[in-house]
Image (tube, rainbow, N blue to C red):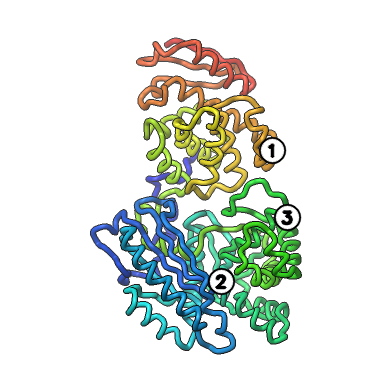
Amino acid sequence: MPRPPSLGDARALGAADMQRDFFGVGARSFARPDRLADGRIGVIDAGSNSVRLVVFEGGQRSPAVIHNEKVMCALGARLNDTGRLDPAGVGRALAALRRFAALADHLEVAALQGVATAAIRDAEDGPEFRAAVERETGIRLTVASGGDEARLSAQGVLFGNPGAAGIVVDLGGASMELCGVAEGRVGPGVTTPLGPLRLAAIAARGGDVGAEVRRTLDALDPSLRAHGHRMYLVGGSWRALARLQMDRADYPLKVLHEYTIGPDDAAGLADWAAAASPEAIAAFAGVSQSRAPVLPFAGEVLRGLLAALAPREVVVSAFGLREGVCFENMPPLLRRQDPLIAGCIDQEQRRARAPGFGAELGDWVLRALHPADAAEERLIRAAGHLADVNWRTHPDYRVQGCWETVTRVSVSDIGHRARVILGAALSYRHKRGRKTLAGVDAMRLISEAERDRAEQIGLALRLGIEIAAGTPGVLGDVEVTRDEAGLSLTLGGASAELRGEEIERRLAQFAKALGVEGRIVSA
């Protein structure tokens, strides 16, 4: 069985790795050559609705966010009426960017990349604003064309999910970009004027927003229609709608990234949001007062997209333009890594007792479990790296710690069901028995067979860690085989003296979960 892409596998994202068609080798604000190889990457996104600074951890394929700050400036609020940036928004944006420039220095950002999108691109006074920003802060805002914006957002989706295939739809304040992704590559992108701020201006003049949406989407190139593929949603308005859908559907896993909505549920959400008042939307937890007024227009756009593109599934991506910019600034070695495995290795390096043991443990568990496919093999390897990261947690809270590990750390490209299986496996590694997860609502996302498999993985991890006491160099002498006769554990070489009652007990538990008998063989 072929192994999935790993840290040393150049096939992972090999094609997308070559796509540096936006920044190229252009200068970066505050670039510090002595730290670019593994330094922190800062991204400033000056959008139509908000201005944001995100600082990513350096030297990681799945970097944690060191700092994330947003100021709602509504630069594009009056663009449709005046052709210029909103004056109050300009003042707020300059104040925010002065702070961001100072923070970048305090946070020792190695490369700070500023991107301006639709409002600044289209405004008559956009060049004047950019000059003021550079004069007052030193930050150079690179203006992204509509196609550039689409490609960067799509590249951000590939950053989190290298296997993404379908259409990426990035909804900003003043525009909406679409771009195809497949086989690790980003296709040509287009921009449309379907941002909620523009649609709000049309509605204020008494125009038919729905007709404008349909007219614009009907004119799209046929190559940008999903036709049974996935549609990936990028942008704050889409994320807000996804939170609403989670509440409406009583969805048990509050992780927006890779949240998948079927076409019927997505249509129901679109109809509800398009007809709802801002007050009704703002009543939901997690929806900001500033975002609520534009969500009915986002609902109208979603309704049009579902009709025009006919996607098989709608997938929410927490990654977009800013992650696409981060990806552009990563060294090639990092861009080629598997984001899930890289993220798990990073957690192991930071938190495990013996970093490096996880790879050995994963190999050992695979010999016992015979994975069904490459996806399950990859999941088991991820579990091996994470199996010991909660050892410092109080025993009464280790199961809770396992769920926090799979829902709150920087891992991606896993999907919600696999995320739940991984969390369950890590929980069973610490505590066996179905009652262990009786209070975990997310378990209803997986089948009974998947629960069984999670228990088997967890008990295999538990046995391997117990044999070796979590130390490298031991499991290589411990052979585990499974055949019609049952599960055999052979202790040979330096491991011959490791047999004990606890090993026999945990072997019996693991074998029982597999429905076979277990035995220890002395070599």
Disc 3/disc 1 C-alpha distance (Å): 22 Å
Q: Identify whether 485 is placed above or below 402.
A: above
Residue positioned 35% across, 25% down in the render: 473
The residue labelled by disc 2 is 172
The residue labelled by disc 3 is 248
Q: Identify whether 329 is placed above or below 376.
A: below
Residue 447: give its label: 1
- Number of other residues with Cα within 10 Å of mark 3, as a class: few under 14, some 14 to 19, many 20 or more: few
Q: Is residue 144 visible?
A: yes
Image position, residue 236 (x, y; %): 57, 65
Image position, residue 228 (x, y; %): 67, 61
- Number of other residues with Cα within 10 Å of mark 1, as a class: few under 14, some 14 to 19, many 20 or more: few
Closest to the observer: 515 or 296? 296
- For badge 1, the amino acid type reads Ser
**Among numbered discs 3 and 2, the one appearing first in the sequence:** 2
- For badge 2, the amino acid type reads Gly
Closest to the observer: 345 or 200? 200
Q: Mark 1 falls on what kind of element?
A: loop
**Among numbered discs 3 and 1, the one appearing first in the sequence:** 3
Q: Quadrant of residue 523?
A: top left
Residues marked 3 and 1 touching at CB (< 8 Å): no
Residue positioned 39% across, 20% down in the render: 477
